[in-house]
Amino acid sequence: MSLKITYLGSKPIGYACLQHLLERKEELDIEVVALRTRFRKEFEGPGDLTALAREHNIPLLDSLDEIPECDIIYSVQHHELLQPVHIARASRIAVNLHLAPLPEYRGCNQFSFAIMDDAKEFGATIHEIDARIDHGALLFEHRFSIPDHCWVNDLYQLTYNAAVKLFRESLPDLATGRYQKVSQAELKQTRSEHLHFRSEIEQLKYVDLNQSAEEIARRIRATYMPGFEPPYTEIDGKKVYFFVQ
C-alpha cells in the first residue's frame, strides 16, 4: 500500500519540495493525498502550488481540520501551527522542514537574527512537529558556514539550496522510517536556544543613526530584502528608508 502524505506548504521552497515529492512518487511508492497552502504576494511568480496540486489531482484543504487520515504530514514553510488533533491524523509522524538550525533559531525571521547575532554557522533542519513552535525532535539537518559580511537575501538563498538538498536526500529515509530522533533538550547543552516572532522584525528594521557604522551596516544587511519593507530611520517623525543600488 502506498505511503500516504498530507502536504502543507507555501512559498517557492514549498513548490520545489512538492514537485520533487511528485517526481519520486512511483519510485518511493508515495501518494500525496491532500494539500493545504496559501498565496503570498511577496513570492508570486513561477511556482503555483494550487496549480501543481490540480495538475496531479491532489485535493485542496480549506483548513487544517480537513487533514485526512494519512501516514505522514509534511510541512514546508506552512503558516499555521498544528494542534495535537491535527498531528494525530498522521499515523507515523508529522514533520517540518525548517529553514534554520535548531534550537538556535526557532520561529520567524531567522536569517535576519543570525546576521544580527554575527552567527558563524547556519543551516536547515527537518524535525518532528509537536504542539510548540519548531520544538520537536530533530530527524535530519544540514549546516554550513555563513560568509563574512553576508546579506539576508544571500543567507536565504544559501539556506534555500541547503533545505532543498536536505529534503531530497532525506526523503527515502523518511519514507522508510530510517532515522533517529534527537531531542532538542539534549542539544541545549551545546547549542543556544532562541524563539523569534514575526512582530519583532519592525523593531529590527529601525536604524539608530547614533549607533556605530558597523552596527548600522549589520542592521541594514540583516533586514534589506527585495519585496519587503526596507530598513529605515526616522527624521521629524517620518520614516526614511535605506535602499541598495
Image (tube, helix red, strand yellow):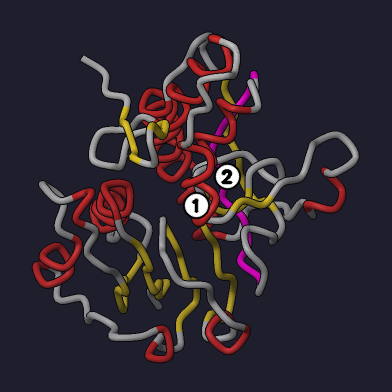
Q: Residue at image x 42%, y 28%?
A: 152
State the separation of the CA atoms marked 1 and 2.
Answer: 6 Å
Q: Position of residue 237 (x, y in %)?
A: 39, 41
Residue range corresponding to the magenta coloring = 120-130
Asked whether 21 or 157 is in front, the reply is 157
Q: Position of residue 8 (x, y in %)?
A: 38, 68
The answer to whether residue 215 is magenta is no
Q: Is residue 126 above or below residue 192?
A: below
What is the quadrant of residue 67 in the picture? Answer: bottom left
What is the quadrant of residue 51 in the picture? Answer: bottom left
Q: Is 82 on the left or on the right of 192, as rendered? A: left
Asked whether 70 or 62 is in front, the reply is 62
Element under disc 1: strand
What amino acid does circle 2 point to? Thr
Q: Residue at image x 41%, y 56%?
A: 77
Q: Position of residue 123 (x, y in %)?
A: 56, 33
Q: Are marks 1 and 2 in contact (CB under 8 Å)?
A: yes
Farthest-out residue, front? 236
Element under disc 2: strand
Within 10 Å of disc 1 (Cα), the crowding (few <14, some 14-19, many 20+) is many
Within 10 Å of disc 2 (Cα), the crowding (few <14, some 14-19, many 20+) is many
Image quadrant where one finds the N terminus? bottom left
Question: Where residue 154 is drawn, which disc sits there?
Answer: none
Residue marked by disc 2 = 125
Query: Of helix, strand and loop, which mostly describes the magenta segment?
Result: strand
Image quadrant where one finds the C terminus? top left
What amino acid does circle 1 point to? Leu
Asked whether 177 or 6 is in front, the reply is 6
Q: Is residue 221 above or below residue 61?
A: above
Residue marked by disc 1 = 97
Q: Which mark sits nearer the N-terminus, 1 or 2? A: 1
Q: Is residue 125 above or below residue 162?
A: below
